[in-house]
Image (cartoon, rainbow, N blue to C red):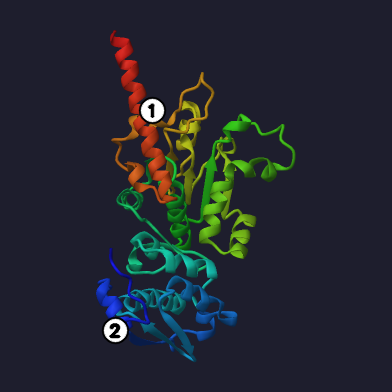
Amino acid sequence: MIEMITFERASYYLILKFYHIKTYKLTEAIINLESVNPIEFFGVNNNKLDVLKKKFPLLKILSRGSQIKLSGSPEIIGEAKEKIELLIQYLERNGQISENYLEQILGGDDEKTIDNFIDRNPNDVLVFGPNGKTVRARTANQKMLVAACDKNDIVFAIGPAGTGKTYTAVALAVRALKNKVVKKIILTRPAVEAGESLGFLPGDLKEKIDPYLRPLYDALDDMIPADKLGYYMSTRTIEIAPLAYMRGRTLDNAFIILDEAQNTNDLQIKMFLTRIGPNAKAIITGDPTQIDLPKNQQSGLFRAARVLKNIDGISYIELDEEDVVRHKLVKAIIKAYNKDDERITQFKEQEKNK
């Protein structure tokens, strides 16, 4: 039996030595905040400084005017300095930071989270959001989507939920509008649940279709300030409408996105593709795992992608679970369903061959 050593019987040093506890020499570091507003960094009543202290409870953190002093082990100080430098970079560019973004930067240890706020490679940025958040292609296939859009006038982007198809497409459209490559943005998707008629729903056109077009609004909210977005919508510089309202139009000098194209039938997607004018770009997105058409209808997306795939000026990009940029569990969910689909397919093949 090992006899316990108390403070009364031995020194603190001997206790550490007895239990082989590693000791560190405490050090200090001072970080200057002269390039940013210290009040914005520390927050009202030091509320943002308190968030920093919670992130690093083993550090002693003091604010001194336009400086911040860190005391603790060299390893933890090094980690804290990296995070604080990221916060300073963000503030230098945007002038302010919300507590939500502060917590995300402090809590994000992966490159995707950090790059979401800090411009390590400004050339990759598609759009700067209204809160300073940068929008860029994150994965290899998303970058292929950007490159394909730069080189082609029509791009099919096919992949499961959460792979950034719609978000990247909207970012490309906003970039084209800001760079005056196009004069307007047209975003459309089929309102499958309402049978494309929408007439029986209460309210005006906007109130009828908004529930089906909400994901497109959400993406725009991340990329364009609210007042400017309102102006664009009122002047029809940005137009969001169900697919049924595209019939008979010629869509020229525009960046057009057909979202949820897996829910179009053969005639609908052909109608859409033949609306595109000579000075327009189009991205068609779809998810083969989320087809909501009636059982007696087949999706027109996959025939269109197959038939048009080898035409010059038309590109086909396929995204997969490795491109998922939502919660980490989304990737696991998609993989689990894919694995189960494979099991079911194998079982059906075995039953067929009996």
| Amino acid on which disc 2 is placed | Lys
Give the labeled residue for mark 2.
25
**In front: 49, or 105?**
49
Question: How far from the left and from the top, in percent, is residue 215?
Answer: 54, 47
Q: How far is disc 2 from disc 1 in space, using C-alphas?
A: 67 Å
Question: How far from the left and from the top, in percent, is residue 277?
Answer: 46, 44
Q: For the image shown, how many numbered marks are present on the structure?
A: 2
Give the labeled residue for mark 1.
303
Please identify the residue farthest to the bottom as the structure is shown. Answer: 65
Q: Residue at x 57, y 32 (%)?
A: 192
**In front: 346, or 125?**
346
Q: Is residue 250 left or right of residue 339?
A: right
Secondary structure under the numbered disc 2 in the rendered image: loop
Above or below — where is 273 with respect to 325? above
* Res. 314 in view: yes
User: Tags 2 and 1 in contact by the CB under 8 Å rule?
Assistant: no
Question: How far from the left and from the top, in percent, is residue 46?
Answer: 55, 81
Question: How far from the left and from the top, in percent, is residue 301?
Answer: 42, 32
Quadrant in which the N terminus appears: bottom left
**In front: 87, or 206?**
87
**Marks 2 and 1: which is nearer the front?**
2
Q: Is residue 113 left or right of residue 196?
A: left
| Amino acid on which disc 1 is placed | Arg
Q: Residue at x 33, y 46 (%)?
A: 322
**In front: 108, or 320?**
108
Please identify the residue farthest to the right as the structure is shown. Answer: 202
